Amino acid sequence: MHADPYYTALATAFVRGRLANPGATIEDGLVAGLRLHKFKNDTLLPRVQRVLGILHGLSPESLLDVGSGRGAFLWPLLDTFPNLTVTSIDTSEQRVNDINAVRTGGISRLTALQMDAERTTLPAKSFDVVTLLEVLEHMPNPAAALSNAVSLARRFVILSVPSVPDDNPEHIHLFTPDQITAMATAAGSHRTTIEHVLNHRIAILRVEA
């Protein structure tokens, strides 16, 4: 865990983008009432820690994060890999606007697009790695979303899903390892490896032959 309470560069960029002030500080953002809690660098979730560890081994040059949400994975990712070009997609206009405020505020290697993961309009094989963390369990057609992710990746797709039932009404699927493997194979994965972390499964799909 960092000594500083925030991912400072990212939080500062968000404030500068939101306030349209290139000299603004985190303190200015707090005074203005901006909600910066999403940029706090609290202890990482175990699944986020593990995915970051996997990415260290893969050394991607570009990454697409599908369903970035409030940034529970996106902010640690950008902080951990300061030279990585990252594209984020989400269906929420507000969340996309928040992410693009970080870009406007100075993090030019980050781009956010409002897009449905099942039907993206991005070119095939556009990214070294595609991540779908806590996404597929929400989707009416997870197989389509995974197939689309595989089509966009040059090397690997990494996904995480819950491994135990929970009380989140937005979770409409609970995948077994066999279901994940079958879905990945149908999507075009050449090899799928599944790991287990606290209450979650992480799957690494090798896309390249």
Image (tube, rainbow, N blue to C red):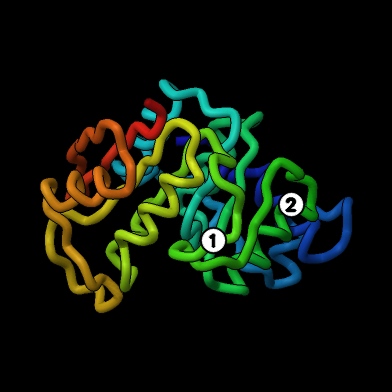
- Amino acid type at image mark 1: Thr
Residue drawn at x 20%, y 67% as measured from the top left = 173
Residue drawn at x 74%, y 59% as measured from the top left = 15
SS label for mark 2: helix
* Residue 190 locus on image (x, y percent): 29, 32
- State the separation of the CA atoms marked 2 and 1: 21 Å
- The answer to whether residue 125 is above or below residue 87 is above
* Residue 182 locus on image (x, y percent): 18, 48
* Residue 106 locus on image (x, y percent): 79, 46
- Amino acid type at image mark 2: Arg
Q: Mark 2 points at which residue?
A: 103
What mark, if any, has residue 84 been given in the picture?
Answer: none
85 and 156: which is toward the camera: 156
208 and 117: which is toward the camera: 208
- The answer to whether residue 88 is above or below residue 31 is above
Labels 2 and 1: the sequence-earlier one: 2
Q: Name the residue under label 1.
A: 120
Residue 37 visible within the image: no
